[in-house]
Image (cartoon, rainbow, N blue to C red):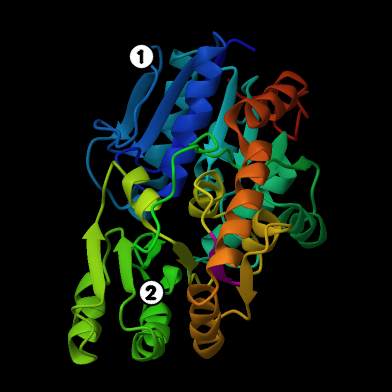
Amino acid sequence: MKNICFLIGNLNHAGGTERVTSLIANGFAERSYNISILSLVGGDNPFFNLNDNIENHFLYSKSVSFKKRILQAIYKLRQFVKKQKIDTLVVVDSISCIFTVPALVGLNVNHVCWEHFNFKNDLGKPVRRLARQLAARYCDAVVTLTERDKQYWLDGTHHRSQIVAIPNPCPFPPQTYIKKENTKIVLAVGGLTQIKGFDMLLEAWVQVNSSMPDWKLVIVGEGEDRNKITGFIKRTKLTESVCLVGNTSHISRYYEQAEIFCLSSRFEGFPMVLLETLAFGLPVVSFDCDTGPAEILKGTGSLLVPKNNTKQLASALIKLMNHKEDRKMIGIKSRGKSEKYQPKEIINQWVFLLEGLKKQNYFLYGYIN
């Protein structure tokens, strides 16, 4: 295995998928692998730092309709893989297997699907269900982020691939800074989209604010629902209690200032933000999404509440606000657990997987060149 390529939607974006792809790619580059990242669109200005030895490419410089250009995209991808002499293609997000499965037919290339979402959710795109079935059948391996999601793949696909769970790495080592006290800040991080559930968090915050008016909610992230969220904040008179920060490349300062973290997502794959909270020793109140929070927070003492239950979310936040010693104990346990998710440990699992891949030679392999 000489040349590894990560295929991603757009490396310019500031989301968790782009962040963890950058981390894993950097980890391989530091171990002297030849690494490239290929964006379907854009990627010319990566949001997260990349190792200087990583080559950055894109299929299209600006947004295109892949429904109209699916055959062209498959052809361009195939030509790229051949020209760059790629040995292993890691597909970041299963939906892109719609392109990669046909593009790699007949090529001696290891093919890995890296799932970043919950198998039970197609994110409103039925084609994702088809892509997952193709990945399970024709990729050499499928990487899920949790053991629970691995089982969903095993139960829900006619798989020939090996399916393995490898968690995301934490981008921060366990922090040793002295925690500021009495900042009375609850932090939430994520894109301002329906998936992240900030509408439900704000509904809960109406209740929290009436009981704990001296606490503030800081939301870091940007997205399509900003106007809707801003409108709700104004209507409910929360302008003095809620701050929308937007995107930032200095997220650590917000973790350092906060006393509690809240995750209000409707669903998750493996939320990077919770890994970060472990490193910073933040107690968490989270909806018990189908995959992610329960595994990450297990054994820390952080609080899980039934998903989409805003009343219990508010009650759990108020409970932690009123118990300073509980917050401290959770912080100690969280920092300890963050050791499990440090990049070195996760990269070791990836190296073991990719070095052990054996081509499956599915139906047309060897006939098309």
Tally of numbered tags: 2
The percent position of residue 247, horizontal first and vertical second, equals 26, 52
Q: Which residues are magenta?
A: 283-288
Q: Of helix, strand and loop, which one carries label 1?
A: loop
Q: Badge 2: few (under 14), some or many (20 or more) residues near its Cα, within 10 Å?
A: many
Identify the disc placed on residue 117: none
| 241, 150: nearer the viewer | 241
Badge 1 is on which residue? 52
Give the secondary structure at mark 2: helix
Residue 285 painted magenta: yes
Q: Is residue 338 above or below residue 246?
A: above
Prevailing SS of the magenta stretch: strand
Residue 289 lies, in percent from the top left, at 61, 70
Which three-letter amino acid code belongs to the residue tagged 2? Answer: Phe
The structure residue drawn at horizontal position 58% and vertical position 30%, both measured from the top left corner, is 343
Q: Is residue 172 above or below residue 156?
A: above
Q: Quadrant of the C terminus?
A: top right
Q: Quadrant of the N terminus?
A: top right
Residue 338, picture quadrant:
top right
User: Which residue is located at x 37 percent, y 24 percent?
Assistant: 50
- Kindly identify which numbered label has been placed on residue 198: 2
Looking at the image, which residue is at 60% across and 45% down? 335
**With 361 as the anchor, is 254 left or right in this view?**
left
Answer with left or right where residue 349 lies relative to residue 117: right
For residue 278, above or below residue 214:
above
